[in-house]
Amino acid sequence: MGLVGQLAAQTVIDSGEDLITRVRRGDAEAFRQLFERFARPIISFIYDMVGQRELAEELMQETFVRAHRSIKTLQDDTKLSTWLFGIAKNVAREALRARRRDERNIDIDDSQFQGLSDDRLPPDSELLSKELNRVIHAALAALDEDKRLVFTLKVFQHFSYEEIAEVTGFSIPKVKTDLHRAKTEVRRQIRQYQGDLGE
Amino acid sequence: MKCEDCLIIIDEYVDGELDERQRHLMREHIEACRACAREYKLITAEPDLFARYQRNVEVTPALWANIEARIAAEAPPVSLLTTLRARFTKWVTTIVTAPRMSPAFTFALVLFAIGLTVVTMKIVNVRETPTVPGDGTQVATGSLPPAPEQMSKSTPPPVVGPTVVDKRAIDGFATGDGLKTASHQRPRPRVEKPKTPQMLIREAEERYLMAIAMLERDIDKKRSRLDAETLTRFENAIAAIDQTIAETRRALREHPGDPTVAQYMLTAYAKKVDVLQEVAGF
């Protein structure tokens, strides 16, 4: 069979492959689909870990570039989400270590909330949303890295304990313990806010 | 159950991770204890609270563009041939899987393209017996004929002078354009300058261009009768093929002795003829 026939046959065979197989094969379009599927959760996760928008954008790009480099190491039974979040976790922790080395404080940057708005809510709800954001952002920043990691993966990304253990490398008992303590600390900060809401 | 015991496992209770016995104990305690009931209510309201958490980040096209650029910068340099092969593969995949083409028709096109390519490559590999140019004999020389995009539909196909063509070359062309003999000389044994593969490729290209020009004129007459969807698909297919032709022509100029590039180019021309024939037949 000549070149054109081979290409035609190959097209039929490839049509049934799933994303992970195509990504592992180096399919550029499949990698783009991977990006479109995971870009938002990844950047949200990294932002929760590092607390700064510009840094989160930079680290998100680094995550996908590293993912592209290590695509060939993907196993058939690897879950794309845990694989990617594992890379994002490493990227975020490296950045946090570098920041600690530079002796920069992890301050709450209130200016990050200036642009926030919710056009769909009336003005008083909008004010509450900004305050809520500030309180949650501060609560996350106050957690140590391990607790922040487990908390964001469980509460915001809705990972299971097993998935969190796979991403973090922690044992499941440590995941549960850190999560419980993280929730206790975060609740201590947001309870007053919830009390303000009259709940 | 005591409150301190309840508060230890209240998260697991909310998440549905307790066994039936523990769930029963928790239910009973929460119904009886106002403090724990309040805590339970606040905990069950947390998902909604966290769902309203807004982060000042968004995924913009610029982020993907940066990622693409970084990946491209890290990629090892690929040869022009590898790039062409990848683009050719993508192009053929797009054309062959076009919904309007039935499997049988696609298979027929593939067979036709294969046959044409095999014949053309045979022609390229044919070596003329050494000859000496005779009187009045002209051979096709010069650069590649003008690119397809330079030919307007109203202009006649390029006439490449009186041409001496090997009869074996003519017999191989399925487009059946027929022989073009040199001027008006009576057939007689003559000594010919051996044709290089490049000359034969140019001749094959010229024939394709003539066939394409004729088909395009036919289609122009029928264009108003084509529905919008067919017209759009046709124009998209032709645009993709023209791009491949342009790239393969450029590659052939840079690598004139590369038979693979010549094969790609001639196959692209053949494909264009096929598509034009299909639409002309509407």
Image: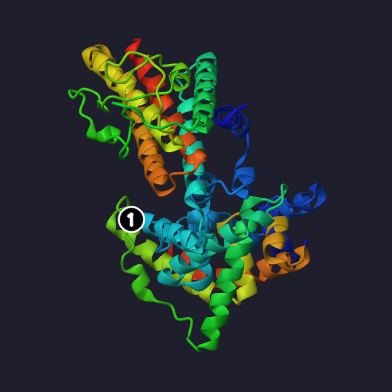
Question: Could you say where residue B218 lies in the image, as x and y percent from the top left?
Answer: 26, 14
Q: Quadrant of residue B166?
A: top left
* Dot 1 alpha-carbon crowd within 10 angstroms: few under 14, some 14 to 19, many 20 or more: some
Residue A115: image quadrant is bottom left
Q: Residue at x 44, y 65 (%)?
A: A57
Viewer-nearest residue: A199 or B120: B120
Q: Nearer the viewer, residue B228 or A171?
A: B228
Quarter containing the N terminus of chain A: top right
Judge left or right: residue B264 versus residue A72.
left
Which residue is painted at 35% across and 19% down in the image? B276
Is residue A198 placed above or below A98 in the rendered structure?
Answer: above
Q: Is residue A185 above or below residue B226?
A: below
What chain does mark 1 sit on?
A: A
- SS for dot 1: loop
Residue that sits furthest to the left in the current view = B154
Residue A2: give x, y in percent of width and height.
59, 28
- In the rendered image, residue A173, in percent from the top left (x then y), is placed at 77, 66
Name which residue type carries label 1. Answer: Asp
Closer to the camera, A161 or B33?
A161
Answer whether residue A104 is visible to the viewer in this image: yes
Residue drawn at point x = 53 percent, y = 62 percent: A65
The residue tagged 1 is A118
**Camera sees residue B229:** no
